[in-house]
Amino acid sequence: MDLANYKKVWKDQPEERNKISSLDIYKMTQSRSTSIVKWIFMIGLVEFIFWFSINYFATKSGTFEPYAKLNLMTFLDYSNYLHYLIVLLFLLLFYRNFSSVSAIDDTKTLMKKILLVRKTVKWYVYYNLIGVVVFSIIINVLIFNTPNYLSILYDINPSSIDQGQMMTIIIITQIVMISLMLLVLWLFYYLLYGILLKKLNKNYLELTKLSEIESI
């Protein structure tokens, strides 16, 4: 049944039944939307704890020792502080979205909030993916600008190798690793947030139809 026929059938219903059905549809859609936004917040929180734990144990295990040799730990520390601050701000937005969606009592406002949730999640994903690229570029520039970085990192005598060729190999390796990391992150975000956003978009479309019918 297309929307025009659906509107006609809806309009022809008794007024009391029409109101009850509209309210039921709205409540079900709001309940599903609230649940989805709650899951977005919970996943973001678990993700934050996971990456924080990885970074903590990597620091304790000496994974960042090469950066310490190049005197880059200060840059890494401040980068991590900034990253955590931005992620916490996103989590705050996720929680605020969840609180506001669960408290909404009209269709059009709920539709606006759903659009806001979708926009917030997309900006969160963009931030993480773009952040990986920007951080990798900056850290590599700092490494290559460090005098005798090859001898410091690999215990190699710079005069015994072709430094240009070695730099090319390092850059290609870095590009491959960053590309793989971006692919893994994209798949991670697509499977988690992407599926939830699709369900949220379905709710939005249902609310759009409901809003059109209510305006008859």
Image (cartoon, helix red, strand yellow):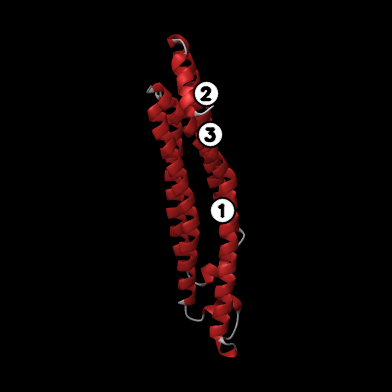
* Screen quadrant of the C terminus: top left
The N terminus is located in which quarter?
top right
Vertical relation: 80 (above or below) 165? above
Asked if residue 111 is positioned above or below residue 120 in the image, the reply reads above
- Please state the horizontal and vertical placement of residue 9, each as a whole percent of the image: 48, 18
Q: Looking at this view, is 99 or 193 the one in front?
A: 193
Looking at the rendered structure, the kind of residue marked 1 is Trp
Secondary element under disc 2, as helix, strand or loop, is: helix
Element on which disc 1 rests? helix
Q: Report the disc number at residue 28.
A: 2
For this orientation, the residue located farthest to the right is: 61
Residue at which label 1 appears: 186
The residue at which mark 3 appears reads as 36
Whether residue 66 is situated above or below residue 210 in the rendered picture: below
Residue 64 in view here: no
10 Å crowding of disc 3: few (<14), some (14-19), many (20+): some
Q: Is residue 181 left or right of residue 74?
A: right
Which residue is found at the position 57% from the left and 81% from the top? 166
Tag 2 near tag 3, CB within 8 Å: no
Query: Which structural element holds mark 3?
Result: helix
Q: Which badge, 1 or 3, is on the more N-terminal residue?
A: 3
Q: Residues within 10 Å of mark 1 (few under 14, many from 20)?
A: some
Where is residue 14? Give x, y as percent: 46, 10
Image-based side of 208 in relation to 188, left or right:
left
**Mark with earlier residue (2, 1):** 2
Which residue is at 46% across, 50% downward?
Answer: 84
Q: Are marks 1 and 3 in contact (CB under 8 Å)?
A: no
Tell me the amino acid under the disc marked 3: Ile
Judging depth in this view, the residue of 193 and 98 nearest the camera is 193
Q: Observer-nearest residue: 64 or 143?
A: 143
Whether residue 101 is visible here, answered yes or no, is yes
